[in-house]
Amino acid sequence: MRFKLSNKTDKYQWTQHALMKLKYYGLSQQRITRVIKSPQRIEEGIVENTIAVMQPPSMNKKDGKKAWTSEIWAMYQLKGISRAKQENKDNLLNKQKQFKIISVWRYPGVSPKRDPIPQEILEELTSFK
């Protein structure tokens, strides 16, 4: 499959690593932006000042419960905003609203829950979308 990948848009900036992972896992940029806009789970990324978001590709109903066999993850950073500035809402809202997508991946199965993002930060993130 051949398609053109864009390095930078008004709202999203993609690292070369993320673009390579898109090709490797057969994902599109539109699919990852959908994961970022409406994630099922949000956690603190393993890299400092990053956020990891997850959305299952599709859900099946097993025994009356929703289940999935894999997950699509994206790790991003709000461009130009450090952790200290995230706590100050005035600075955060005045900054340019751009996401720097660092990495994307597929996780086989259901990943264990790790470090959830505090509710205050989640509310700030939803204001960007």
Image (spheres, rainbow, N blue to C red):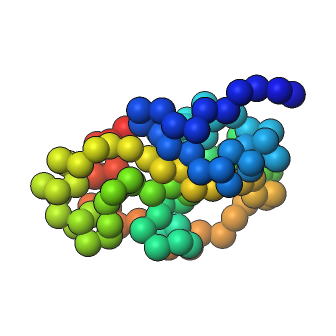
Residue 25, image x, y percentages? 80, 46
Residue 78, image x, y percentages? 39, 54
- Residue drawn at (48%, 33%), measured in percent from left and top? 9
Residue 119, image x, y percentages? 32, 61
Residue sitting nearer the eye, 30 or 123: 30
Residue sitting nearer the eye, 102 or 122: 102
- Asked if 76 appears above or below 30 in the picture, the reply is below
Residue sitting nearer the eye, 100 or 63: 100
Q: Is residue 27 left or right of residue 102?
A: right
Q: Is residue 116 visible?
A: no
- Asked if 114 appears above or below 24 in the picture, the reply is below
Q: Is residue 104 left or right of residue 60?
A: left
Residue sitting nearer the eye, 18 or 53: 18
Q: Is residue 68 left or right of residue 115?
A: right
The picture quadrant where one finds residue 77 is bottom left
Q: Quadrant of the C terminus?
A: top left
